[in-house]
Amino acid sequence: MKKSITIPSILQSILTSDEVALVVQSVGYMDKARKFTVYHLLQYWCAAAS
């Protein structure tokens, strides 16, 4: 079976978690959750939109 390309892997190649952290920091947002970060939220939104 061929390996399929999923939306999260495409997102990871375009936008890294470090870049998202820099943008979030420049806006002044502080993550309150320990495990569910803004980067995970973006991954969830991309998967839901697809």
Image (cartoon, grey):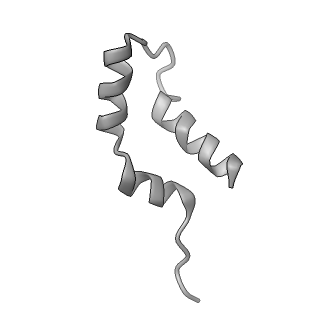
Residue 23 pos. (x, y %): 35, 26
Residue in view at x 53 percent, y 29 percent: 36
Viewer-side residue, 41 vs 34: 41
Residue in view at x 47 percent, y 22 percent: 34
Which corner quadrant of the image does residue 31 belong to?
Answer: top left
Which corner quadrant of the image does residue 41 belong to?
Answer: top right
How many numbered badges does the structure rendering display? Answer: 0
Which corner quadrant of the image does residue 24 belong to?
Answer: top left
Q: Quadrant of the C terminus?
A: bottom right
Viewer-side residue, 37 vs 19: 19
Q: Quadrant of the N terminus?
A: bottom right
Residue 21 pos. (x, y %): 34, 28
Residue in view at x 43 percent, y 12 percent: 29
| Whether residue 31 is situated above or below residue 16 in the rendered picture | above
| Whether residue 31 is situated above or below residue 41 in the rendered picture | above
Residue in view at x 55 percent, y 86 percent: 2
7 to the left or right of 28: right
4 to the left or right of 39: right
| Whether residue 36 is situated above or below residue 1 in the rendered picture | above
Residue 25 pos. (x, y %): 33, 18
